Amino acid sequence: PPSATPSPIQAYLDTLHREFSGLTAGEVATYIPELAKVAPDGFGIVLATVDGQVYEVGDARHAFSIQSVSKPFVYGIALEDNGRARVEQAIGMEPTGDPFNAISLEPGTGRPLNPMINAGAIAAAALVAGTTEAARLARVLDALSAFAGRPLDIDQAIFESERDTGHRNRAIGHMLRNYGIVDGDPEPALGLYFRQCAVRVDCRDLALMAATLANGGVHPATGQRAVRSEFIEPMLSLMTTCGMYDYSGSWVYNVGLPAKSGVGGGIIAVLPGQLGIGVYSPRLDERGNSARGVAVCRRISADLGLHFLQPP
Ligand code: GLN
């Protein structure tokens, strides 16, 4: 039953949603043919606290593909399965200032510069443990599900669409093989990467995944541990410096929260120890970030004073 006094947070989110519904800049991603079919005006905002409160507005339960928001989580799996030293040999930790799909590796080592661009994410997928492709996929799905607090599955049409057209990512996979970052045939790692990007989530899942990161790796509602606490710091560090592609520097300046976006239209932002934010709106700006998502996060950070470098 609706409570007698509506929460001020809920009222705030309702106002935000109303205001930013008017922002219709940007276009849905079309380079993955199946993504071009997405309804462009979907819009949800969800806030989840580490003590398990969830506030949602708009299309909070509308399913979409997670895309690059999967990257920090699979990086966390790679860390758990291999340890920091092995992962650091394969994947760097420098922002690139280049677009997410840049075919650029570190001179000399051939390492991808960080795990939030496609090259680094494909290298991370290659580090997921498991003796068969099915086992490695189950590892990823189980981990993402633990972060979300419910079983997640794959949007098969999105997966097949990217598998059949992802030739640029395939080229990146072969570059990684050339430098010995990926051993042998890169196709299994690419297959896992395309599937992880096609995992179906809603905006509420994103907020809870972010809240699980904020909560040191333990899901606020289920109490299940999704990743070892020692790996939260590297995950959030790279989200801070590299999570928003070539907008990452501006994002830290303007929003000041570890975050990750995906071309499906999702963004997560994390306030460690406090809360997770999920925004869904598939119209993207020229850098491939959700246009409304960026605007909404800027506003929330300013209104609630969430920038992590703000003086006490
Ligand atoms: N699957 C997408 C790709 O590799 C993910 C990119 C993204 O969300 N930025 O192109």
Image (cartoon, rainbow, N blue to C red):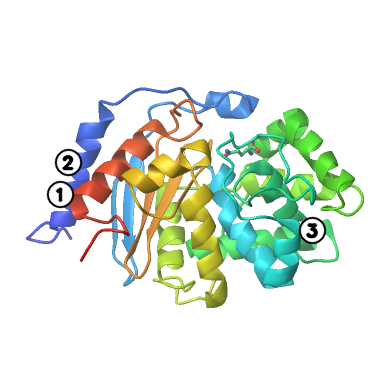
Viewer-proximal residue among 292 and 173: 173
Element under disc 2: helix
The image quadrant where one finds ligand 1 is top right
Task: Name the side, left or right, on which 117 lies relative to 132.
Answer: left
Q: Disc 2 vs disc 1: Cβ atoms closer than 8 Å? A: yes
Quadrant of the snapshot with the N terminus? bottom left
Q: Badge 3 is on which residue?
A: 134
Dot in front, 3 or 2: 2
Q: Is residue 141 left or right of residue 97?
A: right
| 209 relative position to 158: left or right | left
Q: Quadrant of the C terminus?
A: bottom left
Residue 41 vs 13, above or below: the answer is above
How far separated are the C-alphas under marks 2 and 1? 6 Å
Q: Amino acid at mark 2?
A: Thr
* SS class, disc 3: helix
Residue at the left extreme?
Answer: 4
Q: Are marks 1 and 3 in contact (CB under 8 Å)?
A: no
Q: Amino acid at mark 3?
A: Ala
Q: Sequence order check: which comes first, mark 1 or mark 3?
A: 1
Looking at the rendered structure, the kind of residue marked 1 is Ala
Eyeballing the image, is 97 above or below 203?
A: above
Q: Residues within 10 Å of mark 3 (few under 14, many from 20)?
A: few
- Pick whichever, 234 or 211, lies toward us: 234
Q: Between residues 17 and 186, which one lies in front from this camera angle?
A: 186
User: x%, y% of residue 236?
Assistant: 49, 61
| Residue under label 1 | 11
Q: Looking at the picture, how far across and down is residue 79, in whole percent?
A: 66, 68
Residue at mark 3 to residue at mark 2: CA–CA distance = 45 Å
Residue at the image position 49 percent from the left and 51 percent from the top: 241
Residue, x 90% and y 47% (percent of image)?
185
Q: Which mark is residue 15?
A: 2
